[in-house]
Structures are given as C-alpha cells and as structure tokens.
Image: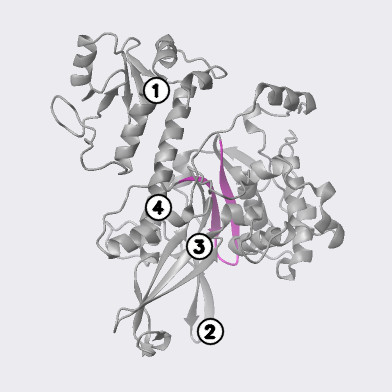
Amino acid sequence: YNIVQSYECGIKSECDHIQIYKNNHSEDFCSLLKYYYSCKYKLTDEKTPIPHCIDCNKFGSRIHFCMFCVYMGCWKDHIFNHYNENKTHYLAFEPEHEQIYCFKCNDYIYDENIDKIIRIQKANCSIKAKNISAPYLNQSSYSEWSPKNDEIKYIIEKSDKIKLQYPDDLLGVRGLKNLGNTCFMNCILQAFLHNPLLRNYFLADMHNRHNCKYRCENDNICFGCELDHLFIQSFCGKAAPYTPAHFLHSVWKYSSYFAGYEQQDAHEFFISVLNGIHTHCNGTINDCKCVIHSIFSGVLRSDVTCTACNHVSTAYDPFFDISVDIPKITDDKNVTISLESCLESFTQPEQLSHEERFKCGQCDRYQESTKQFSIKSLPSVICFHLKRFEQKLVFGTKSSTKINTYVNFPFILDMAPYTCSEILNSRNGIDNMKTDEEYQLFAVVNHHGTLNNGHYTCYVYHESWIKCDDAWITKSSQNTVLNSQGYLLFYIRKQLIYKGNQETIIL
C-alpha cells in the first residue's frame, strides 16, 4: 500500500514533519507495522525477536519504535536518547495506543492517512491469524473504500440539500411518538435507526419501497419498506417527533400477537421484526444472504459429552441474539455481576439432569452427559438479551417477576473467549492465538418499573450518547449509559469480516 498515493486526497496533518516522512519512508513504515502486528498475532517464528527495549531489554514501559531504523526503546528514557544521538530520526510509533510521536513537535500527532495505513496493516495481520486458527472462515484481505473525485462530484450534483431544523450533528436523530403503550416498539426502532450497518443499507437505497415487488404482491405489508420510509423520515432534517402509525399498523397485520394497545416485550418484538424483514427482503431458508442474516446472524455450537466414554456429539444452530441468565445475588458484596461473567456462565459445561439424558452414539444407550455452548461464527452485530423476566410458582400458580439486579456491561467487549476455537483450545490445553473479536456498544434498551406497569427507554450512540424516551430526545453520557440497568445490549463489531471467494455485500 502506497502511503504517498493515499494522502494526496486526505486532510493535511498539522505536523509538517510527517508529510516529509510519508514522501520518503512509506515502505519503512509498512515494514515496521507488519513486524509489530505479526508478533502481536503470533504469525512469526520463534527466531523473530519480540518487541522490547534494545538498551534495557524490558518488554513493557511503553515501547516506542523508531520510524527510521530498527531501534526500539522505552518511553522518556532510551527512545529520547536515541533521538538525541540521531536528530534525523524524529518520529516514533507507539503501538499500544497506535500513536505517532514527533520529537520536533514535542507531542503526539495525528495524520489521517497514517492512521488508515495502521488500520489496514492491523486488519490484514488479524485476518491472517484468523485464517490459521479458523480456516473455514476463508477471509480475504481488508481494504478501505473512499469515493473518487468524479464520484464525489456526481453525488453532489444528484443530491438535494436538506434544510435542517437543528444542528448538523443531530441529523438522523428524531423522537417517535407513543401511540399507546408502544414504547417497546419505539426503542427497537431507535436501535435499528442507529445501527450503522442497517443505516448504510437503507440510505444506500438497497431497498426501495417504490420498487418493492413483495409489497405489491402481499397486501402492502413489507417491513423492509417500512424501515426504508422510517430512515427517510429520520434523516429528512425535521425536528418534530415522527408518528410511526403505519409501521405499527403493519406490525398488527403481520402478527396478531402484537395487535392492540397492551404493553409488549421489547425482546419479543425485536425477534419478530427481524423475522419479518428476513421474510420480506428475499430471505431464504438455507445460506441466506438477506440484510438481516448478513448483519445479525451468528452460529452457536453445542457440544454434548458422554461422561462414560467422553464421546462428543456436536450440533450447530443459527441465532439472532444471545439470551443470558442473570445469576442470583449473593451476600458477598465483593461479587460483581458483569456481562462477561454471564457469558462465561453461558459457555461453561453444564451437567444435564437425569431426565435430559442423552443417547450416546458410541455407547448406544442413554448416559449422563454435559452440555457446553460456544460461538462458532460471530455476527457483525450482537444483541444480548439479559433475562430479567422469570416465572415462579407461587402457591401453585405461575407468577412473572422482574429481576432488578444490576449487570455491569462494557463499552468495548472482547468476544474471543467465548468462541469455539478458544474454548476447544483451552479444553485441549492448547495456547490460544491472539485475535481481534472486539465489539463496541451502540444501543441499550432499558425497562423501568414492574412487569405489568413498566416503560421502555433507549440509549443510542450518535457521535455522542443520546437518550430516546419516545418523543423526547436528550443528550446523555457514556457513564450514564454504562450505569443503567440494561435489558437489551446492542454491540457492533469493530472490525468487519469480508469473506473470500464470495460475492461482497456492501452494507
């Protein structure tokens, strides 16, 4: 990848020294990145030295790489000594935070195109590592797309300028009126509207309600068309709350279960709408390429192990979301319940009861067995459903109650520990390869009150955090979001996967 070509159309860095470097040392920097990320993802052999300070042999202390030679040194001490001895070596790369330090500017600097090169090199090394540990994924190398000058000109010529009734950074944020206990619907719609992949799909006119054959043939019911219209209304620049009456009417016609003005479960509505969009947008039974499966669908692995002979029977099931149990509160105040601990419990081996005995294919009889879940294929967007509603027998009668236990959930979530490759390696005593399976939180649906008298609100990420309470839109903060109770948590993959030897779907 040629750095010089990449930065000609980019934003000029405030540091002039980096511009000189890019003109003369592009290959040196790419080689440096390949070395570091190859070491990070264990793509090198044992003879390749691990990044460390050349002077003191330390592996921590924020190692900085000289961008002009092979020197590596500790921050503030040896890397500064190296610069003082070699004044022409004025740039250093700090890999932990992926920053560039300019000794002449005496500060860390940012360059858009250098940052782009770092992302590409990191992604490609990560993909190589995944193809080694999970060759069935068959991922191709990563590259970023940006419009050419003639494409930018065409877009400008063919676009109508929107007259905004509010600041530019709030374009796409619009309240939804409550039509009578429809807060459950409004929260899910806001999560859809602020899903970057769904947004890109519909704003790119990948589903046009004016040309939809399904809508013409099926009595005007098409959730794809409804979302297409909803995105248009959200990005039209109007500030007044929108009334999603037509969407609600389509929901009633699609599923009589949601008809009426009773309070409904947001999670059940989410799954129902996903299935509806799948059906209405050319969804198929096997190997579906519809927008919903491309974004939300993952594959869950289930291993049932016979305790008598250790024979393992494996099954695979697709999923749109992951529902996790919330453990009971203990008296130990030091015990913290987190999303990670819930996922760890979800993927732990579970002893099946006597009634659930499994017929072992090797023993040819029903045996005691254990069952363990793991994730074979991670989706681009994961919805975690915290099971806050449970049914209990009270005096012989089933009664539904709500679990109000606080569950700590992170802004960045690493899903690697819950994948089948890592779980199988751990089971077999094999060291796991470092892979990037990080997800970033972009929407949180909360339930307030009791089961029979409650209310749903939603936090969404739109350059900053925003609270959506039906028609009311207010600014929020990350701390407020992370301290909320949480019912549905939406995470998007930080690094998207492009599969090789297949038709690319642009979302």
Name the front one of labels 3 and 2: 3
Dot 4 or dot 3: first in sequence order is 3
Instruction: Answer left or right for 269 relative to 71.
Output: right
Q: Where is residue 441 in the image (x, y as percent from the top left)?
A: 49, 46
Tell me how far mark 4 sits from mark 3, CA to CA. 25 Å
For label 3, the residue is: 299
Name the front one of labels 1 and 4: 1
For label 1, the residue is: 27
Q: Position of residue 95 (x, y in %)?
A: 33, 31
**Residue 123, relative to residue 362: is it above or below?**
above
Asked whether the viewer can see residue 293, the reply is yes
Q: What element carries label 2?
A: strand
Majority secondary structure of the magenta segment? Answer: strand
Q: What element carries label 1?
A: helix
> What label sits on residue 397 in the rendered view?
2
For label 4, the residue is: 408
